[in-house]
Image: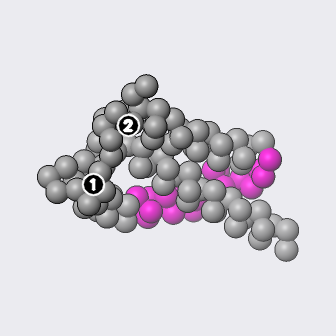
């Protein structure tokens, strides 16, 4: 099935992290401007680096076009990369906040 190899895990990662926050951890990070600012900072670094790594004209990292949606924006970055990046950074921040709250 087209798109399931990389897209489905990316979407599931975002859903899992969202569910982790909303149902279990409840740190409130999604309501904090500092969280969203940190996500903008991450994007500010992710876009040029990921764009350089995945540019179609000379990719360092290539993706099987049958395993993604085929949507690439900007600079030929597969949109799934943003989903995984969001899930990874958010999971780390959630666990950090949870640990901080327990101290």
- Is 42 magenta? The answer is yes
Residue 99, image x, y percentages: 78, 68
Residue under the image location 17 percent in, 57 percent down: 58
Q: Residue at x 30, y 56 (%)?
A: 61
Where does the magenta region start and end?
A: 24-44
Tag 1 residue: 54
Image spot of residue 25 (x, y percent): 78, 52
Left or right, residue 35 beside residue 95: left
43 is within the stretch colored magenta: yes
Circle 1 Cα neighbour tier, 10 Å, few/some/many (<14 / 14–19 / ≥20): some
- The colour scheme of the drawn protein is one colour
Mark 2 lies on a secondary structure that is loop
Residue shown at 44% from the left, 62% from the top:
42
Could you tell me how far apart the alpha carbons at marks 2 and 1 are, in whole angstroms?
Answer: 13 Å
Percent of width and height locating residue 65: 30, 37
Given contact means CB atoms under 8 Å apart, are the residues at marks 2 and 1 in contact? no
Mark carried by residue 28: none
Q: Is residue 76 above or below residue 60?
A: above
């Amino acid at each position: 099935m087209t798109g399931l190899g990389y897209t489905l895990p990316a979407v599931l990662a975002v859903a899992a992290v969202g569910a982790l926050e909303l149902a279990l951890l409840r740190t409130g990070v999604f309501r904090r401007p500092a969280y969203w600012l940190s996500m903008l900072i991450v994007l500010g670094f992710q876009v040029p680096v990921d764009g350089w790594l995945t540019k179609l004209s000379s990719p360092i990292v290539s993706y099987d076009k049958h395993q993604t949606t085929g949507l690439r924006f900007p600079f030929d970055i597969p949109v799934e990369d943003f989903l995984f990046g969001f899930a990874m950074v958010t999971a780390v921040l959630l666990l950090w906040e949870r640990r901080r709250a327990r101290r």
